[in-house]
Amino acid sequence: MIESVVEGPVARITLARPERHNALDREAMAALTAELDRLAALPELRALVLTGTGRSFCSGAALDGLAADWTRNPLTALCDRLEAFPRPTVCALNGGAYGGGVELALACDFRIGVEGMRLFVPPAKLGIHYEPAGISRALRVMGQQATRRLFLLAETFGDTALRDLGFLDHLVAPEALGPRVEALVEEIAALAPLAVSGMKRTITELATGTLDAEAARGRIAACFASADHAEGLAAMRDKRTPRFTGA
């Protein structure tokens, strides 16, 4: 159900359950969480790509596997883990996202979608109150009014609306998804990883109102003292491309 591969500085996780539109049961969510933990410990990693197979990116949590105990819904914990992943994350939406699949995409730093995709979150049609953490993610990315439409009206959003709302950073033809994702991760991989990871954490903490100012100052000091900072200055002086190592 989950396929993972590391190629150089980039990890790729694929949701591989196309016959169920890549729905996530408890087993799949546990496997994905464990894989995120494993990848987070790889020092050479610069970026993570999350995508799906088939016609959909992800249809969210498999309700039949969660109905017995919603108090321990692992989807929120999974999305928290994805949002806190130390390297930049790119969601390559190969198709539509539904329910918890929308939250999974929202937990990523960047989203690239294909023409014809759509998304909706159906709890209002099922008598379910969505988890506050997921609603918060939508608020931060899509804004308050679009979030009201998404949850209170269970409105379906199409591809251009998602781009205009800021949910999608890029909207491309299906055949252009792979090349566009590769271009983005190459851009990320060329940057100073210590600075990028540090600023990602600061952005997330600022957005969620959880900034540890002292820790942020520590990250700033570490970057100024790093070999990557010296390399960046030398490359600028020599008018060449910097070679960052993350040290």
Image: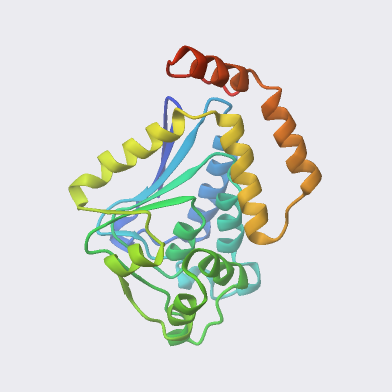
Q: Residue at x 59, y 21 (%)?
A: 228
Is residue 183 placed above or below 192 in the rendered structure? Answer: below
Residue found farthest to the top: 238
Is residue 166 placed above or below 198 in the rendered structure? Answer: below
Residue 186, x across and y down, in percent: 38, 32
Residue in front for this viewpoint, 21 or 190: 190
Residue in front for this viewpoint, 200 or 82: 200
Marks counted in the figure total: 0
In which quadrant will I find the C terminus? top right
Q: Is residue 103 visible?
A: yes
Q: Residue at x 61, y 30 (%)?
A: 194
Is residue 192 placed above or below 102 in the rendered structure? Answer: above
Q: Is residue 247 visible?
A: no
Q: What colouring does the structure picture have?
A: rainbow
Residue 48, x across and y down, in percent: 46, 40
In terms of image quadrants, where is residue 160?
A: bottom left
Residue 196, x across and y down, in percent: 56, 36
Please give left or right for residue 187 compared with residue 82 in the image: left
Please give left or right for residue 221 compared with residue 116 in the image: right
Residue 85, x across and y down, in percent: 58, 44
Q: Residue at x 22, y 64 (%)?
A: 116
